[in-house]
Image (spheres, grey):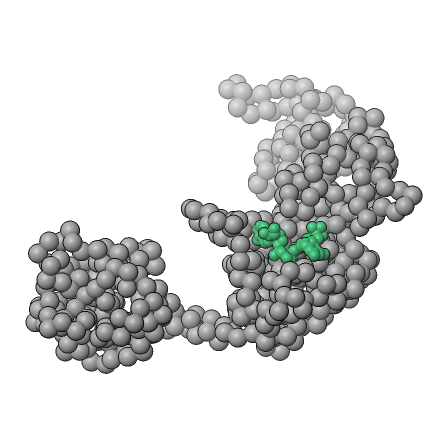
Amino acid sequence: MVKAVVIITVSDTCSKDHSKDESGPALCQLVKEKFPDAYIHTIIVPDEKEIIERELKYFCDSKIDLILTTGGTGLSSRDVTPEATKAVIQREVPAIPIAMTLESLKKTPMAMLSRATAGIRDKTLIINFPGSKKAVVECIEVVKPVLSHAVSLLANDLAEVRVVHDQMQHTCTHSKVSVGKVALRHRESPYPMLDMAEAFNIVDAVMMQWTEGIEEVPIEDSMGRVAALPIHAKEPMPPFPASVKDGYACLSWDGVGLRKVRSAVTAGDTPAAILSSGECARVNTGAPIPSGADCVVQVEDTKLVKATEDNETELEIEVLVPPQPHQDVRPIGFDIPLGAVLLEKGDIIDAAKVGILAGAGYLTVPVRSCPKVAILSTGNELQEPSEEILRPSHIRDSNRIMLKMLLREQGYESTDYGIARDEPAELASAIARALPTCDILVCTGGVSMGERDLLKPVLANDFGATIHFGRVRMKPGKPSTFATCVYEGKTKFIFALPGNPVSAYVCSLLFVVRALRQCTRYTSEFARMRVRLGREVKLDPRPEYARAVLQFPETGELPIATLLGNQCSSRLLSACGASVLLELPGSNKDRVSLPADTVVSALVTGKIDLTRP
Ligand SMILES: Nc1nc2c(c(=O)[nH]1)N[C@H]1C(S)=C(S)[C@@H](COP(=O)(O)OP(=O)(O)OC[C@H]3O[C@@H](n4cnc5c(N)ncnc54)[C@H](O)[C@@H]3O)O[C@H]1N2
Ligand code: MOO
Ligand SMILES: [Mg+2]
């Protein structure tokens, strides 16, 4: 990690008038952007070899990670920065100035006249940059990708070095796919259009290749997970006969009448006395029943007869209602007998089950392990949502975060792999970065008919992937793609979903969540319910999954479904607050719409909010 950087402007002019320095501040700004947490120090020195040398040595001895100089690298007699640098470094890093020169030569042949050098003194990397602001900006772009790693290597920061090496290992710089001549592209998709049922069957069958594992997780992390083994009660609950009421433990066969109050037992106390006929013990709800007693008479069914003078202790009471044997006593194991099944294999763990486990003394629980999911967006038009300025013809990436949240809503975590541009090598590189860490890769964009829709060929050609399907008769989601490949000896499952946000949303629910459920639960289907259409709905030729909310009539009739506005695949507002996906049939010549009141089936994919209209 780069912790401290010194920027030295070398210039006779700027050393006399600091306001003339443009490249130092530019360099400073660029370094700040790259290493926002680093300490940055700037100085300006004249073109004097001894002074430059002295400053370089001073900062190297101060254990600065990186020293960047600007200026004094040209051919004039006063340009001595490379000489001063060479005098202090112990080892040269010649490829750095070569890389900078190669890049600068693309802009100007004057780059040939830079004598910049780079090298190492102890654990400090020194790099000379030319003096002009423009050149500095160009050259820092060239070296930026290696600075952090170079500093980690010098500092012997093995953890950081390993991360970068791992990334490098999985970075492809080439793809077997070329963008190709657009005029020769397919004019008809080569992928057959599958019906939903076929696509689901394929997902279910292929996901069988995921081999079930078991992991032991703390109970507080087990919500929504599926028990992998049955769990039995190690103790009965309650572990002692407990009172259900605040009242008096009595002998039922004494019937109504007077009782001497022998003792008082509150919850947590251990009763000492054994009760005999004509006696009782004051007990609270949850307190153990003393030996001898077989029932509890609630305080409401008694009358005080005698108490101590200070009223601190009851001495005698009268039972007013004849008690039944065992009334208001929870016998041992009443709630949970010893050895009872607390969790069946396959049970989904919810809040109550976590309570049961805690009550039974289980701190961890064995659950089915869950595939690791990676999410990747693709598209030249995409920008990070955090970028301040939206560039012309660009949009912010909404799919990645939306899918992460959607999966979380369904109980699954995922890792973000950023945005890859629609370039074969970039796509291959991003996929190769994600695959080693995940079991399921979810990509969006680039799967339809455009010349930049390259995901299918990259998967097939660069990863030897089998495309199980590449088109499905559904709306939204027509170009939905499901593939598998073997990467580093393990099968990876890849869902390449259409880029349109609603398509990505619906297809994640229908295919990705299905796959995850298949792996982690014993059923993959969402619950289905019958609902009544509130209004007439036009049908698409493809079966459609329309996002809708439900209203529950008070009479107990079927819920009324209302579509969430325009169902266009790009309009994510149509999924906001959706409780269900209506399963609308495709249109045909006899049926182009469904009238209001038609009963249709709906998949319960969201929360059913009773308060929504
Ligand atoms: N000639 C044809 N064109 C299209 C067809 C077709 O069958 N023939 N299918 C259409 C259908 S249906 C869909 S769905 C889309 C799918 O397109 P792609 O998967 O190739 O996705 P892109 O072209 O990359 O993007 C489509 C759309 O989505 C926007 N997008 C992409 N990624 C994101 C993101 N991360 N966040 C927000 N928005 C995103 C992108 O800008 C495009 O507007 O193809 C039709 N075309
Ligand atoms: O199938 Mo696309 O997903 O309609 O828009
Ligand atoms: Mg496209």
Residue 366: which quarter of the image? bottom right
- In x, y percent, where is residue 287? 62, 38
Indicate the quadrant containing the N terminus: top left, top right, bottom left or bottom right.
Answer: bottom left
**Closer-to-camera residue (324/440):** 440
Quadrant for ligand 1 reads: bottom right
Residue drawn 48% across the image and 76% down it: 169
Query: In the displayed structure, would residue 40 be above or below residue 57?
Result: above
When asked about the image quadrant of residue 584, the answer is top right
Q: Nearer the viewer, residue 133 or 258?
A: 133
Q: Residue 76 vs residue 464: left or right?
A: left
Residue 368: image location, x then y, percent: 67, 62
Q: Residue at x 77, y 35 (%)?
A: 561
The relative height of residue 318 versus residue 424 in the rendered view (above or below) is above
Q: Is residue 242 above or below residue 205?
A: above
Residue 116 located left or right of residue 288: left
Residue 195 locus on image (x, y percent): 82, 58
Q: Is 405 or 533 nearer to us in this picture?
A: 533
The C terminus appears in which quarter of the rendering?
top right
Instruction: Tell me the residue at 15%/51% (across/down).
Output: 19
Query: Left or right of 31: which side holds 540?
Result: right
Residue 280 visible in the current orientation:
no
- Is residue 71 visible in the rendered image? The answer is yes
Is residue 242 positioned above or below 414 on the image? above
